[in-house]
Image (cartoon, rainbow, N blue to C red):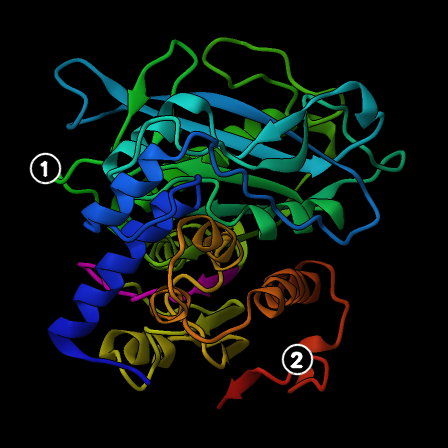
Amino acid sequence: MTTTGVNQRQLITRRRALAAALAAGVAAPIGAAGRASTAAATPDPVRPTLPPPTGPFPVGTVSLHLVDRSRPDPAAGPGRYRELMTSVWYPARNTWRYPLARWMPPAPLRELLTVAGFGADAAVAPLTAGHEGAPVRRRRGERLPVVVFSHGAHDHRSDTTIVVQELASHGYVVVTVDHTHDAFSQFPDGRVIVPVNDPALTPWDFAEDVRFVLDRVADLAAGRNPDAGRRPLPAGLGAALDLRRIGMFGWSKGATATALVMAEDRRVRAGLSFDGPMQSQPPTRELDRPFMLMTAAFTRAAEPSVAEFWSRLRGWRLTVQAEGAVHSSYCDVQWLIPQLARGIGMSDDELRGFIGTLDPARAVRIQQAYPLAFFDLHLRQRGHLLDGPSAAFPEVTFIP
């Protein structure tokens, strides 16, 4: 059932705040002081896990600190330029020599836990499938398609790691971006940045961040190191990037930013929305390239801005929706929240209030299959999952 008006916005705001926290290990509703106090008193931290990717390749990852010296950052104070933390995920080789990356560094994780009313050490971030700094795996002369991810409001770049490492395991290079001052993030010098409301970042700010990141991806492809500290890059990373095949996806505000980037930058050939509201001023223009909506709360029927955006799509387009999904169901929290709920005694009704009725294991399969199918179709010209409804995914409806 879809709610509308103020009640819907309040529900989505609550779920978004919880999603940002739970994704890094928080295990109670924001504002549930009694439940948070109980969790804080638990001697052993919760240790959630992530499902492994299904692709044939091991996964590597590296973080980059990028500084945009053409753009002052109004939230950082006088004389400060826009700084971003990003991660690059890719198929890797010789991974046994390289440690697995955690979901998030300990310091911003503690901030998330504290915001949610927990003890700072109440939980640990799960391990990902990404091996830090491992060399890139590819055939001689092969270049790999690139996909960029933009997160939601008051969130962080790790919130779709299930999708990101799935793409990397199937031969994509995926770049995830922390939108500084609307994200929980940490820079190499130890500075921890948390979301702020004044000044509030807009989807257009997110879009500017991504276009800057695309320029830095071009630097990598040209053999340059864009990291502000010139930290070492994984062997073979720059030579693996195919700048002719770039896609983008985003969740919530990041989905709106995906549409805005595509309207301004033709380097992005295909865009995917995870339940984006598609609200911006000015709104996005018409798009003539492929775009897919995976909707839940922000449907075309319930949200006029989504319906208006749909009417401006002039290229290949598709809307799919998973039965029982809520706003965060296409993110990792759909898998993580149930693990954490068991540790704090959350009731079944409380759990359904946050993740809906979409089974978490089925949600993972949908997250792994449909984004991969979309980018395979439009960046590699292969695959048939998006031809129509699939018996393998009875929860997923194609909406004409």
Q: What is the crowding at mark 2: few (fewer than 14 residues within 10 Å), some, or many (at least 20)?
A: some
Please name whichever residue, 242 or 230, is drawn nearer the observer in this view of the structure: 230
Verify CB contact (< 8 Å) between mark 1 and mark 2.
no
Which of the two labelled residues, at mark 1 and mark 2, occupies the earlier sequence position?
1
Q: Which residue lies furthest to the bottom in this view?
A: 400
Relative to residue 147, is residue 257 drawn left or right? left
**Residue that carries the numbered disc 2 in the rendered image:** 393
> In this orientation, does residue 211 appear?
no
Q: Position of residue 378 (x, y in %)?
A: 65, 64
> In this orientation, does residue 342 appear?
yes
Instruction: Reply above or below: 106 against 357.
Output: above
Please name whichever residue, 247 or 104, is drawn nearer the observer in this view of the structure: 104
Instruction: Reply above or below: 271 against 296.
Output: above
Between disc 1 and disc 2, the foreground one is: 2
Residue name at image x 49 percent, y 58 percent: 338
Q: Quadrant of residue 303?
A: bottom left
Q: Where is residue 255 in the image (x, y as percent from the top left)?
A: 39, 58
Q: Quadrant of residue 307?
A: bottom left
In what quadrant of the picture does the N terminus appear?
bottom left
Q: Can residue 276 be found in the magenta stretch?
A: yes
Q: What is the crowding at mark 1: few (fewer than 14 residues within 10 Å), some, or many (at least 20)?
A: few
Q: How far apart are marks 1 and 2 (CA)?
A: 43 Å
Residue type at mark 2 is Phe
Q: Position of residue 312 (x, y in %)?
A: 36, 76
Q: Residue 198 has which mark? A: 1
Relative to residue 93, is residue 311 drawn left or right? left
Q: Over which residues does the magenta segment extend?
A: 271-283
Residue name at image x 45 percent, y 78 percent: 324
Assign a secondary structure to mark 2.
loop
Q: Can residue 251 be found in the magenta stretch?
A: no
